[in-house]
Image: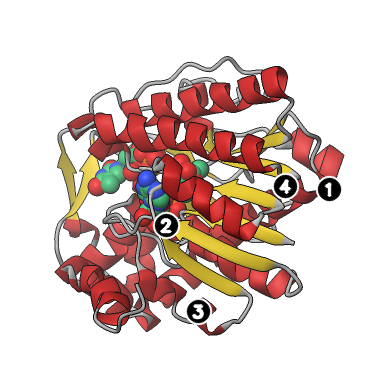
Amino acid sequence: MNIIVTGGAGFIGANFVYYELEKHPEDRIICLDALTYAGNLETLEEAMKNPNFRFVKGDIADRDFVYNLFKEEHPDIVVNFAAESHVDRSIENPEIFLKTNIMGTQVLMDACRKYGIKRYHQVSTDEVYGDLPLDRPDLFFTEETPIHTSSPYSSSKAGADLLVLAYYRTFKLPVSITRCSNNYGPYHFPEKLIPLMISRALADEPLPVYGKGENVRDWLYVKDHCSAIDLVMRKGRVGEVYNVGGHNERTNLEVVKTILAQLGKPESLITYVTDRPGHDMRYAIDPTKIHTELGWLPETKFDDGIKATIEWYLENESWWKNILSGDYQNYFQKMYVDKGRA
Ligand code: NAD
Ligand code: TYD
């Protein structure tokens, strides 16, 4: 099969590219990525050596470009990871979130209609459900929980989800959606909580915890997310939404203290800073549907996953130091443009 993976130079998309190349070596992966600040081609260096992998630089919202790619590649499956993904950036500048996350999704689905595909899979987030109160640990997000968003980021993802379901109902496009909780693991961009805290703790810099650090996130090791998407896009029912999460709730403060303890750094590095506006209190996924229908279960416990993640950041300092210094943004120029490959 030919599979277009959009956003494959980002955190989860890149992990997914490697997951697919290993699990389904018979399939061909075409990664379409605009290489925004969050896309890092260095991450895909190993994948580029695989003859079943192709990287294409382009914007999912660029209709002509996307149509040409579909015409050339005839994808069987399209998995859409490409998005603006950081809540804090969406508070600073919502517009690009609407353009990429909603309009980009529309363009991809129009291309799927025009050229025909077996499955369009939308990678979504539990943030479309809004948040849960801290004093009701009995409550979880199910697929029936109403959409009720808080940030421009989650609103743009919810808008895209609604459009995906509309394309199923109206045009019979064979779609599926996964809504996953917070991921962590290798190649996570160091603006997000876990990699930010690891990189700052290693440099003995203050760790900025928003508000009181009481907000709860349901953490899932990225490989477990990849296995869930792989199952849903191949075997999940068309037109359905599947929640993905592993009952791994932690307060932000617990996460930060775990990182400090693992690195042997003092808790005095923790600095409480002004809270994020509209900050969601708690996310918690009920993954019953994907478990009962498709047999999916997460394999990595938080204690093991966070240890593996910290080890990865220790062993791959140059990857995140290149990002912090901005050097990774010259990589495409150096490896592609300067060599006449793009
Ligand atoms: P990321 O920000 O690390 O990567 C996004 C990738 O998309 C980058 O490579 C970027 O260059 C690319 N991109 C952005 N705009 C583009 C455009 N217009 N055209 C083509 N490519 C473009 O994001 P991530 O954390 O890997 O998240 C991937 C997907 O998973 C997103 O859709 C996000 O909403 C969803 N998600 C993320 C999490 C999480 O915890 N990170 C949890 C649930 C769902
Ligand atoms: P983040 O990684 O941005 O993911 P999301 O907002 O999509 O859940 O943040 C995770 C949690 O960590 C969230 O409650 C905000 C908090 N946070 C901090 O306390 N300090 C920080 O510097 C960042 C980036 C996040």
Q: Residue at x 34, y 25 (%)?
A: 151
Give the Cα separation between the discs numbered 4 and 1.
Answer: 14 Å
Q: Is mark 2 within 8 Å of ligand 1?
A: yes
Name the N-terminal-most of marks 1 and 2: 2
Q: Residue at x 43, y 76 (%)?
A: 311
Amino acid type at mark 2: Asp
Question: Between residues 185 and 226, which one lies in front from this camera angle?
Answer: 226
In the rendered image, the quadrant that contains the N terminus is: bottom right
From this viewpoint, is residue 78 visible? yes
Answer few, some or many: residues within 10 Å of disc 2's Cα (few below 14, many 20 plus, some between 14 and 19): many
Give the Cα separation between the discs numbered 4 and 2.
Answer: 20 Å
Give the left or right position of residue 89, taking residue 86 as reference.
Answer: left
Give the Cα separation between the discs numbered 2 and 3.
Answer: 14 Å
Q: Nearer the viewer, mark 4 or mark 1?
A: 4
The residue labelled by disc 4 is 233
Discs 1, 2 touching: Cβ within 8 Å = no
Name the N-terminal-most of marks 3 and 1: 3
Amino acid type at mark 3: Met
The residue labelled by disc 1 is 295
Q: Is residue 45 above or below residue 27?
A: below
Q: Is residue 228 above or below residue 96?
A: below
The residue labelled by disc 2 is 33
Discs 4, 1 touching: Cβ within 8 Å = no
